[in-house]
Image (cartoon, rainbow, N blue to C red):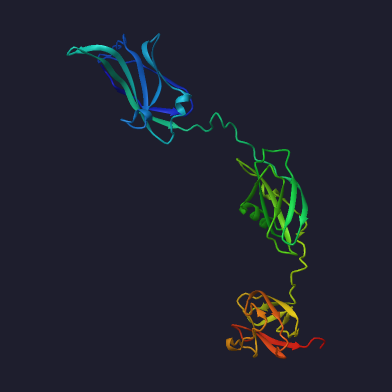
Amino acid sequence: MAFPGTYNINYYLGDTQEFKVYPKNNDGSAFDLTGFSNPKFIIAPTRGAAVENQIAAYAEIATDPSGVHILCAIRPEDATKLDATIQYVYDIELILPESAERNNKSYDIVHTVLTGNLTITQDITTEESGAPEPLPNNPSNLVTGNITDTTIQVSWTAPTTGGTVENYKLAIIPYTTDTNTLIGAIQSSSTSISSDNTSYTFFGLTENTDYSILVLSTNETGDADYANALTNAAAITTADNPLTAEPDFFVTNDGANAYLIDGVSNDTITVVRGETYVINVDAAGHPFHIQTVPSPYSDTDSYDVGIANNGTDNGNITWSVAQNAPDTLFYACQFHSTMGGTIIVVDGGS
């Protein structure tokens, strides 16, 4: 017998791959397959693998003009049990049942006629997937609904062409017409809703603020064109909250040279006893302090009566001016002596 022979197989996953095995004797003549039945074509991840990890592919003894042979096949149903990341081994066996006797005992004669490795090439598509779903088109007709000081409700019309929409990605940013800013906002957004919905309410917004809203279609294939995401041409503005205290003074800065009080360098601030004021500070790196002595800043002379958030460099200072407040106070930067000015305190009607 001139076997087991060795032959390595490359299988294209999902196909039917047939081959024929013609066992030979040592002299090259055909091996007599008479009496042999139930040939086996076994595929396994390793030799010695447990039975439950073995795959029984197709094998039968058949005849064609070239002679009696073993017809073997890996079928699509076998492919469902194979992993393209694994290199398998296989054996093809012949069995002659209980035909040999030794010591008055009968037993099967088994010959492994062919062995080798089985590598797999992954198919590009599977039967279930077919061609990928086309990319969706973007929605149209953005319409604003209810708007409050902290919310904006919008709705839109779903696209009627392009691939099926699975989800809508949404974004809201301060109003802009800059294309790159709009594209960046929708690309990086993590807000997404099912395509079953064609409306959405944005929460947690700031009153009296202009916004840009973007809506983009997506599906399993990918996102629609970012540059053509649905957005508003004109600003959408949140409502005013009449209960919110509006700033009475706006404080910014001219570098480290001076504070700008409503745009005027180190201007004098006048307040009335018994009134409450909001001072909006937008001067990063220049903490704004109210104190009893002129600049420079003195932590031992801070004036804090009726004042909340004294010393902020970004936010609101709220000041309820006491009836016994001094006639003259001062403001000063914590770090720069050139940034400071005078606060005049007067009685009501003065």
| Coordinates of residue 71 in the picture (x, y in percent) | 40, 16
Q: What residue occupies the far left of the structure in this picture?
A: 103
Q: Residue at x 64, y 55 (%)?
A: 184
Work out which quarter of the rendered image holds the N terminus and state it.
top left
| Coordinates of residue 188 in the picture (x, y in percent) | 61, 54
**Taking 144 as reference, is 310 left or right?**
left
Work out which quarter of the rendered image holds the C terminus and state it.
bottom right
Residue 55 found in image quarter: top left
| Coordinates of residue 65 in the picture (x, y in percent) | 40, 8
Count the labels in the image: 0
Residue 85 found in image quarter: top left
Residue 348 found in image quarter: bottom right
| Coordinates of residue 145 in the picture (x, y in percent) | 78, 52
Q: Residue at x 32, y 12 (%)?
A: 36
Question: Relative to 227, does residue 303 appear above or below in the rendering?
Answer: below
Question: Relative to 65, does residue 176 appear above or below in the rendering?
Answer: below
Most foreground residue, 19 or 288: 288
Most foreground residue, 78 or 3: 78
Most foreground residue, 341 or 114: 341
